[in-house]
């Protein structure tokens, strides 16, 4: 049972990383966005994704 839980959390972390990479790639195409605003927004997205 703990193996299944660990596998689930691992899959969730991989999904979070994939989402982060997509978001980062998108943001990097728009260099005019302020870095601090991006950082705050990115942290909010991370919180939302972690609740999935």
Image: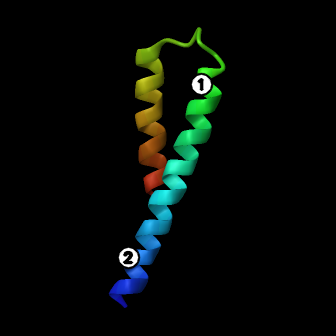
Whether the residues at callouts 2 and 1 have beta carbons within 8 Å, the answer is no
Residue extending farthest to the top is 32
Q: Which quadrant of the rendered structure holds the N terminus?
A: bottom left
Place of residue 6 in the rendered image (x, y in percent of width and height, measured from the top left):
38, 76
Residue at x 45%, y 16% (from the top left corner): 35
Crowd around label 1: few <14 · some 14–19 · many ≥20 (10 Å): some
Label 2 vs label 1: CA separation? 31 Å
Instruction: Examine the rendering and report whether any part of residue 30 can be seen.
Output: yes
Q: Secondary structure under badge 2? A: helix
- Looking at the rendered structure, which numbered label has been put on residue 6? 2
Q: Give whichever of 38, 10 is nearer the camera.
A: 10
In the rendered image of this protein, does residue 50 appear above or below residue 28? below
Place of residue 4 in the rendered image (x, y in percent of width and height, measured from the top left):
43, 84
Residue at x 56%, y 13% (from the top left corner): 33
Crowd around label 2: few <14 · some 14–19 · many ≥20 (10 Å): few
* Residue of label 1: 27
Place of residue 34 in the rendered image (x, y in percent of width and height, measured from the top left):
49, 12
Residue at x 38%, y 85% (from the top left corner): 3
Q: Is residue 29 left or right of residue 38?
A: right
Q: Is residue 33 left or right of residue 37?
A: right
Instruction: Examine the rendering and report whether any part of residue 52 can be seen.
Output: no
Residue extending farthest to the left is 2
Residue at x 57%, y 46% (from the top left corner): 19
In the rendered image of this protein, does residue 6 appear above or below residue 14? below
Place of residue 36 in the rendered image (x, y in percent of width and height, measured from the top left):
40, 17
Q: Secondary structure under badge 1? A: helix
Q: Give whichever of 39, 18 is nearer the camera.
A: 18
Residue extending farthest to the bottom is 1
In the rendered image of this protein, does residue 2 appear above or below residue 49? below
């Amino acid at each position: 049972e703990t193996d299944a839980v660990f596998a689930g959390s691992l899959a969730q972390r991989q999904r979070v990383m994939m989402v982060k990479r997509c978001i980062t790639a998108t943001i990097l195409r728009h260099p005019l966005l302020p870095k601090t605003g991006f950082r705050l927004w990115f942290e909010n997205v991370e919180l939302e994704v972690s609740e999935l």
